[in-house]
Image (cartoon, rainbow, N blue to C red):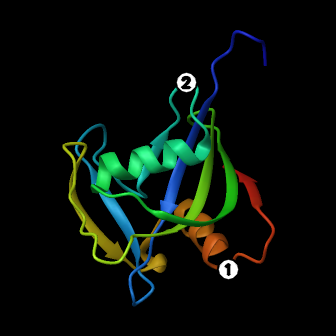
Amino acid sequence: MAFEDKFRLSSHAVITNARGEVLLLKASYGDKSWGLPGGALEPGETIHEALERECIEEIGCGVSVKYLSGVYYHSAYNSQAFIFRCEIPHGSGIQLSSEHTEYKYAPVEAMSAVQRRRINECLAYNGSVASAKF
């Protein structure tokens, strides 16, 4: 990789409800897919700052970060995704931005293989940060 090449980084939150289902947001752009809250880092941001900013933008509230569980390379985007276990503060409600049209809590089993692996590794965190490439 040359010095001038572009490389993407993103931070994403794994947030569960009392039944262990995972919060997903439906994008209002692109292929309108469902995904975890989060997104790309802005120049000068840390992975934690990006996670906080993206959650405030996308779900209308900050999150409490419990731990970083994994870093995953996605060849389709030439990107590294940082996955964090998070909680929504008690009493906070979800208010979507215009970037998303819906939200839902879904069982892990209903997700794509890539999402399932990242989320299962997050929920089974043992103190070691996981890493994989897709």
Q: How much space separates mark 2 and mark 1, taking CA atoms?
A: 32 Å
Q: Position of residue 100 (x, y in %)?
A: 24, 49
Which sits in the foreground, 2 or 12? Answer: 12
The amino acid type, in three-letter code, at marker 2 is Pro
Return the mark for residue 7.
Answer: none
Q: Residues within 10 Å of mark 2 (few under 14, many from 20)?
A: few
- Residue that extends furthest to the bottom in the rendered view of this protein: 19
Height in image: 83 above or below 43?
A: below
* Left or right of 49 on screen, residue 90: left
Residue labelled with disc 2: 43
Callout 1: few (<14), some (14-19), or many (20+) C-alpha neighbours within 10 Å? Answer: few
Task: Left or right? Give the position of 100 relative to 122.
Answer: left
The total of numbered circles placed on residues is: 2
Left or right of residue 53: residue 122: right
Write the residue at 41% across / 55% down.
37
Question: Which quadrant holds residue 114?
Answer: bottom right
Label 1 sits on residue: 124
Q: Secondary structure at mark 2?
A: loop
Q: Residue at x 79, y 19 (%)?
A: 1
Q: Position of residue 79 (x, y in %)?
A: 62, 36
Q: Hey, what amino acid is under mark 1?
A: Ala
Q: Nearer the viewer, residue 126 or 33?
A: 126
Q: Secondary structure at mark 1?
A: loop
Vertical order, 44 against 33 (above or below):
above
Q: Residue at x 22, y 44 (%)?
A: 28
Along the line of sight, which residue is nearer the eye, 113 or 15?
15
Residue shown at 32%/58% (left/top)?
Answer: 61
